[in-house]
Image: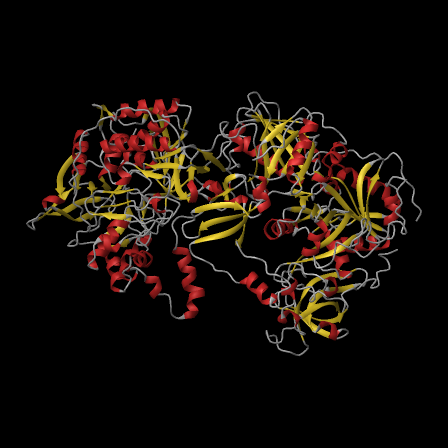
């Protein structure tokens, strides 16, 4: 059968939680909510793995391009354009929430060149941010890591297993907002757990 | 009102809050601060329940969680809780409780006739009775035992309350908030450490709430009040009231349960009923106090016979007197203080039996309440004393249960006549009575010392402050384990109705080890873990077997210390939230479409798309298969694992883990890959595409994705760390759809941007490339086919997954595109003889599956050597064949075993089994794949497929596993 | 149980997957008795009751394969290191 290209067929992107929040009955804004929950919808999220013996060179290249060092030991480095989270020896997540640069992949791939493997994971995650006076109490219901501010500082990220989900958790630089990243397909389960855990404190979901 | 035994003044109850409650349907009144037990005692009630075996009338023995007798049914309907201890239930307005284990009523219990059967119901009777005749077991004995067994009945429906679980971290965990615990928390807290202080009860204070002691010459309750205030105001101290630490686990993990709402009629909105904690800490201090011992004498279980410490608790803490005429029996000094407590509050004390003088209590008379006791003095003279209350004090057992949880055994101390903690779990210290240091002064001192030490070990600076002072105490305790020359039954374990004679019987029959005695008599096996029974039991065992208590030893306690409701261990994870749900990119669209979903691991996948409501799975599947093979079908295959592999040594690595060769795969091509375990059996399969010189994209089965990733990382990090390679899971990055059928190409060409050529010449079978669709949306196209039709898989970044399926269905309409689900996918792959889960069961080799050609002989790979073990090369190993139902009508069952016609069903005659089955719309009959001995030689023959579970016995024809388009012409078109 | 990861620190058991005995060397496929050696490599284990060297994967953490010295009777953990020398290098 002959086929005809359908011009101007537009594909609209959806976020991980889009399909589920649109039809949700949203809870009324409540005063003094213990936590505020919001999905981070537009973001850049790449994985960078240093190839063997290229770590030093890669470090130099990143520094000269972005002015930040490749962090070690689970720490986070931040610049105005991108942030780096060290999630494993020789592996980083590159993320950017505010004004994520489109085509970033095509910009950074030549910079990294043969020094490391870059993989786009911007579609592979659901990221929820949660803030408010009761954040730590809410997260403690499933996260086995000590999130007390003197132990879990804004320069640290942890990958762990909580509420039966693999998740990576870190904070904003001012320590007021927590970010939780899970596999995209688990976004709705993460939201449900957060809501259940926060229910005794009161929560707002911002769309 | 009628609280006849309530004192006019005193107690720690809130007299301004009257509460109404009922017990066995009768209405009573009490006050806020009462427990159910104290309120009933204040109302003159002494009968609380009937014992387990003999249905003897029982009252309250204790005032704490160690209570063996007063087990009641609390609440009703789906909130019903059986076996709740009346001594720890906090009274609330409207509380309704019922006694258990009696019929028709507590007062007149017909089953008390069991008492007469006592000689037959001794220890271990169930090992000796109900044996003969064997046929009676199933129809008569078992149902009868089932009806009679157990204590209390469970609720029928779902619990309407919700439960939570949580983690908590601290520098120092203090278990118990009596004088030792309060002191330890103050010391550690003042030093600046993060402290969590837990207590079973609603208030801090421990024994100080019940005994009128003095600290620094002032009433101890003042010290409790001031300390509580200080603790509450220290930001680094978290007090968890109503929280029992029920277990110690490895590496500084403690389990605790907080009864958040048990003291209310229903929980506050959004509040859980209970919350379990896993507390993680490097240092803990056990300040759990001690439990008083009773004595074993004739009919020592009569209602009204109580531990001395309990009597003092009811009088002092709850202003409830358990009787009007008391007899106080003691073997130590502290027991004598009960005399003063009773007299001060208007209770007559008609006799004081101090066993150290040689006086003994022999026998308690009475039925539903104690009415008198028989006392014998050291000269042998007996007398009867009328009474309605007997207080027994026989020393204390340190509450060291938690110290055993990691396997260490308590050690008997001759001087203290008590078991003390043995080797302590790392990081745990013990203070006060739990360590056998029973005086108040020692508790205060120990608390401060251990609190300071723990804070120091945690890196803090302990503050110096003075230990508060208390009166010196001398116990002079000489325990009496059993008063033998007494009439009546002498109970040791009240909850399981175990008497001293049962222990003697166990010993006579050879169950001399304390572990055997425990199981044979069931002493210590009830919900109270024998807290008030164990030591007396093993002392008696020692006596009759001529051993010291030290020689007999003790059994070990295991978590939980008190029962923990399962809901609190599950928390949020029940019903649909039992496990997380993993949703595919097309999920929303598929639900709108009315798809029926099936769980594949954590994924929800569309099983089939009913055209009209109520279309059954078989009709839908037939329609979907026909539609795909005749025109086009689209299926969401995003769940298959996808792994991005990059690096210098990517190709070399793939050659080592796959049976085939991937270093020779050209860029832009895809190859089927078979992966073995090191023991030679097939592990997983998939297709791997070469996107660049050093860039591959591997796919795995849905179920195998995580396992394969772990395997690749193992091979890289453990076996070959010298290889230069990087793996990243991209399963979730790409929404992937399979489009199959004669019109598949046409459908795709409507969306693929015009400059991209996917004609058969430019993009042949097993090709792959990066493309753009719908105006520059990046995508990846793979020409691979699971269905055997002309097919492609198209992957787009997941954010476009929802939009793409809608677009495909829109543009595809005119090409007859329909959606197909897992059911149709499975049918089509079986028609093509593709192996999947049923065949990749971990017990098959490439040779078994007819995939020997996929194993390169020119190189090693994981599993190569062991896949060629002699047994795995044997000629008669079952190998893959196709099966066709001969009659065409009968269902074939996966799991059916193959037998020759006329042969006896036996292991020897078993020729293999059916691995996958389906109804084939293309052949119009039931077909299957299976593993059959000598399969290839028997092609064309007939065999039976027998399934005794589903009761099928079908004749099948043995054929090639590829049922449709055996030459693959449709694939390459 | 809590297991220390050389990268992530002490973490709950739930984050890990257990494989088995560590220190086994994959036999040379070219050896003349390769099949026998592979058989032992895959199936024969010391199964010590006591201190053993074990391979664990930090599945939900950094996904490093680690070698842990642990006493199987008391659960005491003595050491935890990366299985891969390359990873050891990277975290110096």
Task: Between residue B283 and residue B229, name the one nearer to us.
Answer: B283
In the rendered image, the residue lying farthest to the bottom is: B902
**Location of the C terminus of chain B (image quadrant):** bottom right
Q: Quadrant of residue A161?
A: top right
In the rendered image, the residue lying farthest to the top is: A31
Q: From the top left corner, tell me how far across and down residue B71 is, in percent.
A: 35, 44
Q: From the top left corner, tell me how far across and down residue B969 is, in percent.
A: 86, 60
In the rendered image, the residue lying farthest to the right is: A2
Q: Which colour scheme is used?
A: secondary structure
Image label count? 0
**Location of the N terminus of chain B (image quadrant):** top left
Q: Can residue B872 be seen?
A: yes
Q: Quadrant of residue B886?
A: bottom right
Q: From the top left corner, tell me how far across and down residue B636 is, in percent.
A: 75, 46
Relative to residue B450, is residue A3 depicted above or below? below
Q: Can residue C60 be seen?
A: no
Q: From the top left corner, tell me how far across and down residue B176 is, in percent.
A: 34, 35
């Amino acid at each position: 059968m002959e086929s005809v290209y359908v011009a101007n067929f537009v594909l609209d992107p959806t976020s991980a939680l889009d399909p589920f929040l649109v039809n949700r009955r949203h809870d009324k804004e409540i005063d003094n909510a213990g936590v505020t929950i919001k999905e981070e919808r537009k973001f850049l999220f790449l994985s960078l793995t240093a190839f063997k013996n290229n770590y030093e060179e890669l470090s130099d290249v990143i520094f000269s391009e972005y002015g930040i060092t490749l962090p070690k030991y689970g720490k986070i480095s931040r610049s105005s354009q991108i942030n780096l989270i060290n999630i494993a020896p020789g592996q980083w997540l590159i993320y950017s929430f505010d004004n994520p640069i489109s085509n970033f992949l095509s910009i950074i791939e030549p910079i990294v060149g043969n020094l490391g493997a870059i993989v786009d994971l911007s579609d592979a995650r659901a990221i929820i941010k949660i803030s408010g006076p009761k954040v730590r109490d809410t997260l403690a219901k499933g996260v086995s890591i000590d999130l007390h501010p003197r132990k879990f500082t804004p320069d640290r990220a942890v990958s762990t297993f909580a509420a039966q989900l693999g998740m990576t958790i870190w904070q904003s630089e001012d320590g007021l907002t927590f970010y939780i990243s899970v596999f995209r397909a688990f976004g709705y389960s993460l939201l449900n757990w957060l809501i259940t855990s926060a229910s005794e404190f009161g929560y707002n979901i911002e769309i | 009102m009628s609280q006849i035994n309530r004192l006019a003044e005193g107690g720690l109850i809130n007299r301004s809050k009257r509460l109404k409650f009922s017990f066995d349907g009768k209405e009573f009144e009490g006050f806020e601060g009462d427990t159910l037990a104290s309120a009933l005692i204040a109302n003159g009630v002494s009968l609380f329940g009937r014992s387990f075996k003999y249905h003897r009338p029982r009252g309250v023995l204790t005032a704490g969680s160690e209570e063996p007798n007063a087990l009641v049914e609390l609440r009703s309907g789906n909130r019903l809780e059986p076996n709740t201890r009346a001594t720890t239930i906090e009274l609330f307005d409207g509380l309704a409780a019922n006694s258990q284990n009696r019929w028709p009523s507590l007062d007149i219990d017909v089953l008390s006739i069991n008492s007469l059967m006592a000689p037959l119901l001794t220890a271990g009777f169930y090992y000796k009775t109900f044996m003969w005749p064997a046929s009676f077991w199933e129809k008569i004995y078992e149902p009868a035992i089932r009806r009679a067994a157990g204590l209390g009945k469970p609720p029928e429906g779902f619990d309407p309350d919700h439960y939570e679980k949580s983690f908590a971290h601290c520098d120092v965990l203090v278990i118990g908030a009596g004088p030792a615990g309060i002191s330890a928390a103050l010391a550690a807290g003042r030093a600046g450490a993060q402290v969590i202080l837990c207590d079973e009860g609603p208030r801090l204070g421990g024994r100080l709430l019940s005994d009128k002691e003095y600290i620094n010459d002032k009433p101890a309750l003042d010290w409790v009040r001031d300390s509580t205030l200080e603790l509450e105001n220290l930001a680094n101290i978290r007090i968890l009231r109503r929280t029992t630490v029920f277990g110690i686990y490895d590496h500084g993990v403690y389990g605790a349960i907080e009864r958040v709402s048990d003291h209310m009629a229903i929980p506050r909105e959004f509040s859980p009923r209970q919350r379990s904690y896993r507390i993680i800490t490097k240092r803990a201090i056990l300040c759990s106090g001690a439990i008083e011992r009773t004595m074993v004498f004739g009919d020592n279980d009569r209602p009204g016979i109580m531990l001395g410490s309990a009597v003092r608790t009811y009088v002092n803490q709850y202003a409830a007197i358990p009787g009007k005429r008391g007899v106080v029996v003691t073997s130590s000094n502290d027991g004598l203080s009960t005399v003063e407590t009773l007299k001060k509050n208007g209770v007559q004390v008609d006799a004081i039996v101090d066993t150290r003088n040689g006086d003994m209590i022999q026998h308690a008379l009475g039925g539903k309440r104690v009415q008198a006791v028989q006392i014998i003095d050291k000269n042998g003279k007996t007398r009867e004393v009328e009474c309605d209350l007997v207080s027994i004090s026989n020393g204390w057992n340190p509450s060291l249960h938690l110290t055993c949880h990691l396997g260490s055994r308590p050690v008997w101390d001759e001087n203290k006549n008590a078991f003390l903690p043995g080797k302590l779990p790392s990081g745990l210290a013990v203070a006060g009575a739990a360590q056998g240091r029973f005086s108040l002064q020692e508790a205060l001192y120990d608390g401060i010392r251990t609190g300071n030490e723990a804070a120091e070990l945690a890196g803090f600076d302990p503050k110096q402050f003075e230990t508060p002072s208390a009166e010196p105490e001398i116990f002079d305790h000489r325990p009496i384990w059993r008063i033998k020359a007494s009439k009546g039954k002498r109970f040791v374990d009240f909850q399981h109705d175990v008497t001293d004679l049962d222990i003697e019987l166990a010993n006579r029959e050879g169950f001399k080890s304390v572990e055997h005695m425990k199981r044979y008599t069931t002493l210590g096996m009830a919900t109270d873990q024998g807290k008030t029974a164990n030591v007396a039991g093993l002392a008696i065992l020692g006596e009759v077997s001529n051993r010291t208590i030290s020689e007999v030893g003790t059994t070990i306690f295991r978590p939980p210390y008190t029962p923990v409701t399962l809901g609190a261990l599950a928390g949020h994870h029940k019903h649909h939230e039992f496990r997380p749900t993993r949703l595919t990119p097309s999920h929303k669209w598929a639900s709108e479409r009315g798809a029926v979903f099936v769980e594949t691991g954590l994924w929800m996948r569309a099983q089939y798309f009913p055209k009209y409501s109520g279309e059954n799975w078989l009709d839908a599947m037939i329609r979907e298969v026909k539609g795909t093979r005749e025109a086009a079908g689209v299926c969401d295959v995003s769940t298959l694992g996808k792994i991005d592999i990059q690096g210098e040594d990517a190709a070399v690595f793939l050659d080592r883990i796959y049976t085939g060769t991937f270093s020779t795969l050209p860029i832009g091509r895809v190859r089927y890959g078979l992966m073995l375990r090191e023991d030679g059996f097939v592990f997983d399969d998939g297709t791997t595409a070469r996107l660049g010189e050093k860039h591959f994209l591997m796919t795995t089965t849905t179920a195998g994705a995580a396992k394969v990733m772990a395997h690749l990382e193992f091979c890289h990090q453990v076996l070959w760390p010298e290889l230069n390679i990087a793996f990243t899971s991209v399963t979730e990055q790409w929404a992937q759809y399979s489009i199959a059928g004669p019109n598949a190409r046409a459908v795709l060409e409507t969306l693929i941007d015009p400059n991209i050529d996917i004609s058969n010449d430019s993009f042949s079978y097993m090709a792959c490339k990066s493309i753009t669709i719908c105006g520059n949306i990046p995508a990846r196209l793979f020409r691979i086919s699971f269905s055997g039709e002309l097919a492609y898989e198209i992957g787009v970044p997941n954010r476009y997954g929802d939009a793409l399926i809608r677009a495909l269905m829109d543009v595809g309409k005119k090409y007859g595109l329909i959606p197909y689900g897992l059911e149709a996918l499975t049918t089509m792959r079986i028609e093509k003889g593709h192996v999947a889960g049923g065949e990749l069961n971990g017990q098959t080799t490439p040779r078994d599956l007819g995939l020997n050609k996929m194993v390169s002989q020119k190189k090693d790979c994981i599993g190569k050597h062991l896949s060629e073990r002699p047994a795995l090369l044997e000629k008669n190993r079952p190998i893959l064949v196709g099966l066709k139902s001969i009659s065409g009508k009968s269902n074939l069952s996966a799991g059916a075993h193959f037998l020759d016609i006329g042969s006896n069903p036996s292991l020897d005659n078993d020729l293999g089994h059916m691995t996958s089955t389906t109804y084939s719309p293309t052949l119009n009959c039931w077909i299957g794949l299976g593993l059959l001995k000598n399969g290839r030689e028997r092609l064309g023959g007939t065999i039976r497929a027998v399934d005794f579970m589903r009761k099928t016995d079908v004749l099948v024809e043995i054929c090639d596993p590829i049922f449709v388009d055996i030459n693959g012409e449709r694939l390459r078109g | 149980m809590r297991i220390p990861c050389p990268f992530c620190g002490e973490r709950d058991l739930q984050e890990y997957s257990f494989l088995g005995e560590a220190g086994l060397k994959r036999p040379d496929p070219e050896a003349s008795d390769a099949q026998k050696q592979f058989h032992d490599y895959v199936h024969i284990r010391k199964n010590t009751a006591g201190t053993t060297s074990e391979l664990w994967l930090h599945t939900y953490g950094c996904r490093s394969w680690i070698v842990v010295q642990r006493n199987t009777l008391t659960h005491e953990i003595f050491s935890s290191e990366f299985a891969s020398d390359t990873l050891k290098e990277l975290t110096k």
